[in-house]
Image (spheres, rainbow, N blue to C red):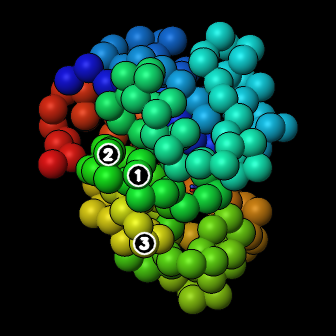
Amino acid sequence: MQLNIGFLASHTGSSMRAIVEAITNKELIKSDVRVIISNNSNSFALNFARENKIHAFHISSITHKDEDRTICSTLLDHDVNLIILSGYMKKLGNVTLEKFNNRILNIHPALLPNFGGRGMYGKNVHEAVLKSGQSVSGATVHLVNSEYDVGRVIAQYQVPIMINDTVEILTERVKQCEQKLIVDVVKRLEDGSIQLD
Ligand code: GRF
């Protein structure tokens, strides 16, 4: 299936960059990055988009009174059929959620259904994982709905937890695995071996 991807990112957009790289390397052959939206005007993600001549928009509740409708119409205007949240720190509004039902993916830095939910982002997740004494962590790609981290799990990769791991070390290991995972998921969406409906 041809994928027209729209990204939403608040900071670095590391998985977005991994996908752009995979498209450039021809690892992904039926994917096109249509637009990048960020709520943060200084985000690395927006700068990256502009440097790479990808349509980029700064949309937040301050810049746009109806943020949700503006996000949704921007995605529609760019013919997006798959949204990927690449470190997007805000909840999406109902207009976008409904219009893109089963077409929105998020990457979570742990093995859902554990270590998800409100407040479970960034280093909080890895701190909780290390504290729990688990021997594995990993990354999850899941569908997005109106609640945090409860949409259907699409795919997961595991990473081991080592005895001397710190939050920083585990963050880095999981981040690398997230990038491989999201590229793999997009590849499998392209070839139809993963379906979102
Ligand atoms: C990732 O760790 C991912 O799990 C979460 O946001 C983080 C990426 O943010 N959804 P960034 O690319 O470093 O801004």
Question: Looking at the image, do the residues carrying marks 1 and 2 touch, with CB atoms under 8 Å apart?
Answer: yes
| Secondary structure type for disc 2 | helix
CA–CA distance in space, label 1 to label 3: 15 Å
Q: Which amino acid does label 2 sit on?
A: Lys
Eyeballing the image, is 102 above or below 73?
below
Q: Would you name the residue on which mark 1 appears? A: 95
Q: Quadrant of residue 120?
A: bottom right
- In the rendered structure, which amino acid carries the disc numbered 3? Glu
- Under circle 3, the secondary element is loop
User: Horizontal placement of 20 versus 40: left or right?
Assistant: left
N-term mark: 1 or 3: 1
Q: What residue type is labelled 1?
A: Val
Q: Which mark is residue 29?
A: none
Residue 12 shows in this picture: no
The x, y position of residue 44, in whole percent, is 77, 34
* Residue at 26%, 20% in the rendered image: 2
- Report the side of 74 relative to 83 (left or right): right
In this orientation, which residue lies closer to the viewer: 94 or 121?
94
Residue placed most toward the observer, 77 or 170? 77
Q: Which of marks 2 and 3 is in front?
A: 2
Task: Check whether the beta carbons of the residues at disc 1 and disc 3 lie within 8 A of each other.
Answer: no
Q: In this rendered view, identify the residue nearer to me: 116 or 139.
A: 116
Label 3: which residue? 147
User: Which residue in the protein does label 2 denote?
Assistant: 99
Residue 76 location in percent, x, y? 40, 29
